[in-house]
C-alpha cells in the first residue's frame, strides 16, 4: 500500500448500508479449514453465520501490521506476518496482490521485484530484466507477470529499504514469496493455533494495468475468497485498493468489507487517469466524494497527510475535517503508514538524523490517535500497541 507504490459509481446495496456488518472478531468461532467443504462452497456457521460484530468487533484504534512486521523482517514474508501476530497486531496486511504469468496471485509490494527479491542474482533470469510503463511511470526491473509461479518459487525475499533497516538484511534469503492462497491457509492455521480470529487486509495492486494484460485481479481474488469460504460480510478479510473502480468491481463480486485507499490530495487514482475522470483525491475527500465512496465501501485508507497536513518545515499542521466527515457517512478511517525511523516521522518527532535511527513514534501516535482515526497501518505493531495502551490509559 501507500503513495510509495512507485515511490508515488455503483448503487449502494442493502448489505453495504450498515458499517461493520457481522464479521468474526477476536475470540469468535474459528474459520473452517481449507478442504473439500470450502471447494464445494459449503458454509459453516463460523464462515457465514450471524455471530460477531464485524469491523465493530475490532479494538480501536485498530493496529494493522503493515506488510506484517516489516520494521523487523523483510516485508510480505511469513516471517513478517507471524511476527506481527506475535506482537498482537489486530490485523495483518497479508498480501499486496500481483499476478504471475500463469495467473496465480502472489504477495509483493509491487510487480517489479528487483528490490524485494534476489532475482538479480539469478543469471537464468537476467534476460527478463526490462522497462515497462506502470501507471504512467517508466519502471525498469523484473516483473511478476513475466514469471510463472514455479519460477518465482526459486526466488527468496530480501529487505526493500536496507538503508533504513540494515538489521533486516540479516534475514535476506530466508523466506520465499507467499501466494495469496497460502496466506488464506495460513490465516486458518494461525487462527486455530492462537485461539483467536486472525484478520487479513489484502490490497489489489495496479488493477487497471493488470486487467489490460488479461490478468484481472478482482475475479481471481473473489474466486479464492469463495473457495475458502471468506467472501461474506462475516469474513475477517478486508479488501483494499487505490483504484475506486476496482473496489466497485469487488463490491459486485464479494460481500467482504472494502476500503478505498487515498494518496496525496493532488493526485488522481490511475483508473481515473485511464478513463479520463478529472477528479483528484481532493475531490474524493469532500463530503460529496465520501458519500459516493460510502455507497460501495466501508472505509477509506488515507495517507496520514490527509488527516494532518505537514507544514513547510515538515512539522504537523492543523488536522483536516476528514475524520469527522468520513464518520458522518459511516466510513471508517485506517490511515497509513506509521514507522519508527526518523525519515518517516513528522519533523518534531525525529531524534537525530540517522536514517535507521528511531525518533519519538509514541508522540506521533498520540497526536494521530487524538484525531479520532479508527486505526492505523504501521511497520512496528509492537510500538503501536504500547502507544494505544498509553492513549487509552491502560
Image (cartoon, rainbow, N blue to C red):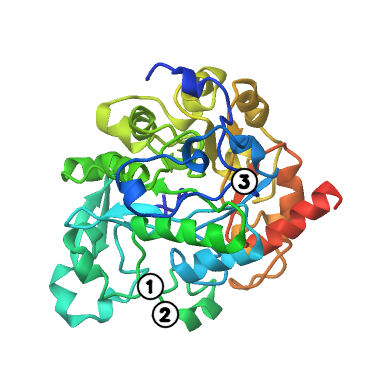
Q: Is residue 217 left or right of residue 393?
A: left
Q: Are marks 2 and 3 in contact (CB under 8 Å)?
A: no
On the image, numbered disc 3 is attached to which residue? 28
Q: Residue at x 27, y 57 (%)?
A: 139
Q: Earlier in the sequence, mark 1 or mark 3?
A: 3
Give the image location of residue 88, x and y in percent: 65, 60
Q: CA distance from mark 2 to mark 3?
A: 33 Å
The quarter holding residue 217 reads top left
Label 2 crowd (10 A; few <14 / some 14-19 / many >=20): few
On the image, numbered disc 2 is attached to which residue? 174
| Above or below, comparing residue 112 to residue 127 in the picture | above
The quarter holding residue 359 reads bottom right
Q: Earlier in the sequence, mark 2 or mark 3?
A: 3
Q: Are marks 1 and 2 in contact (CB under 8 Å)?
A: yes
Give the image location of residue 253, x and y in percent: 33, 32
**Disc on res. 157:** 1
Give the image location of residue 92, x and y in percent: 53, 55
Q: CA distance from mark 1 to mark 2?
A: 7 Å
Q: Residue at x 69, y 57 (%)?
A: 384
Considering the numbered disc 3 on the image, is that residue within a helix, a strand or a loop?
Answer: loop
Considering the numbered disc 1 on the image, is that residue within a helix, a strand or a loop?
Answer: loop
| Above or below, comparing residue 230 to residue 77 in the picture | above
Q: Earlier in the sequence, mark 1 or mark 2?
A: 1
Q: CA distance from mark 1 to mark 3?
A: 33 Å
Q: Residue furthest right?
A: 393
The quarter holding residue 304 reads top right
Q: Residue at x 43, y 54 (%)?
A: 33
Amino acid at each position: 500500500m501507500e503513495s510509495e507504490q512507485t515511490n508515488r459509481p455503483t448503487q449502494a446495496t442493502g448489505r453495504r448500508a450498515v458499517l461493520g456488518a457481522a464479521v468474526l472478531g477476536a475470540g469468535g468461532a474459528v474459520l473452517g479449514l481449507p478442504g473439500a467443504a470450502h471447494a464445494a462452497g459449503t458454509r459453516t456457521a463460523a464462515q457465514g453465520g450471524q455471530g460477531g460484530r464485524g469491523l465493530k468487533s475490532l479494538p480501536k484504534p485498530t493496529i494493522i501490521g503493515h506488510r506484517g512486521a516489516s520494521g523487523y523482517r523483510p516485508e510480505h514474508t511469513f516471517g513478517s506476518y507471524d511476527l506481527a501476530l506475535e506482537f498482537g497486531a489486530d490485523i495483518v496486511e497479508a498480501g499486496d496482490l500481483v499476478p504471475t504469468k500463469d495467473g496465480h496471485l502472489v504477495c509483493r509490494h509491487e510487480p517489479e521485484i528487483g528490490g524485494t527479491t534476489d532475482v538479480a542474482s539469478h543469471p537464468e533470469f537476467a534476460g527478463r530484466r526490462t522497462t515497462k510503463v506502470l501507471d504512467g511511470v517508466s519502471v525498469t526491473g523484473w516483473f511478476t507477470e513475466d514469471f510463472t509461479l514455479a519460477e518465482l518459487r526459486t526466488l527468496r525475499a530480501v529487505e526493500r529499504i536496507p538503508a533504513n533497516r540494515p538489521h533486516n538484511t540479516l534475514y535476506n534469503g530466508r523466506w520465499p514469496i507467499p501466494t495469496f492462497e497460502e496466506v488464506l491457509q495460513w490465516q486458518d492455521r494461525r487462527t486455530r493455533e492462537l485461539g483467536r480470529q486472525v484478520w487479513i487486509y489484502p490490497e489489489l495492486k495496479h488493477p487497471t494495468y493488470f486487467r489490460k494484460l488479461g490478468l484481472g485481479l478482482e475475479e481471481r481474488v473473489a474466486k479464492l475468497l469463495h473457495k475458502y469460504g471468506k467472501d461474506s460480510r462475516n469474513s475477517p478479510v478486508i479488501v483494499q485498493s487505490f483504484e475506486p473502480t476496482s473496489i466497485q468491481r469487488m463490491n459486485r463480486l464479494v460481500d467482504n468489507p472494502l476500503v478505498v485507499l487515498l494518496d496525496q490530495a493532488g493526485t488522481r487514482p490511475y483508473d481515473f487517469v485511464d478513463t479520463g475522470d478529472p477528479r483528484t483525491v481532493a475531490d474524493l475527500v469532500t463530503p460529496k466524494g465520501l458519500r459516493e465512496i460510502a455507497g460501495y465501501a466501508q472505509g477509506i485508507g488515507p495517507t496520514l497527510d490527509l488527516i494532518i497536513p505537514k507544514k513547510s518545515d515538515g512539522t504537523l499542521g492543523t488536522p483536516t475535517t476528514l475524520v469527522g466527515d468520513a464518520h458522518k457517512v459511516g466510513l471508517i478511517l485506517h490511515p497509513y503508514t506509521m514507522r519508527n525511523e526518523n525519515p518517516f516521522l513528522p519533523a518534531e518527532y525525529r531524534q537525530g538524523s540517522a536514517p535507521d535511527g528511531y525518533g519519538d513514534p509514541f508522540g506521533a501516535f498520540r497526536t494521530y490517535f487524538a484525531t479520532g482515526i479508527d486505526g492505523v497501518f504501521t511497520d512496528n505493531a509492537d510500538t503501536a500497541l504500547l502507544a494505544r495502551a498509553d492513549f487509552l490509559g491502560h
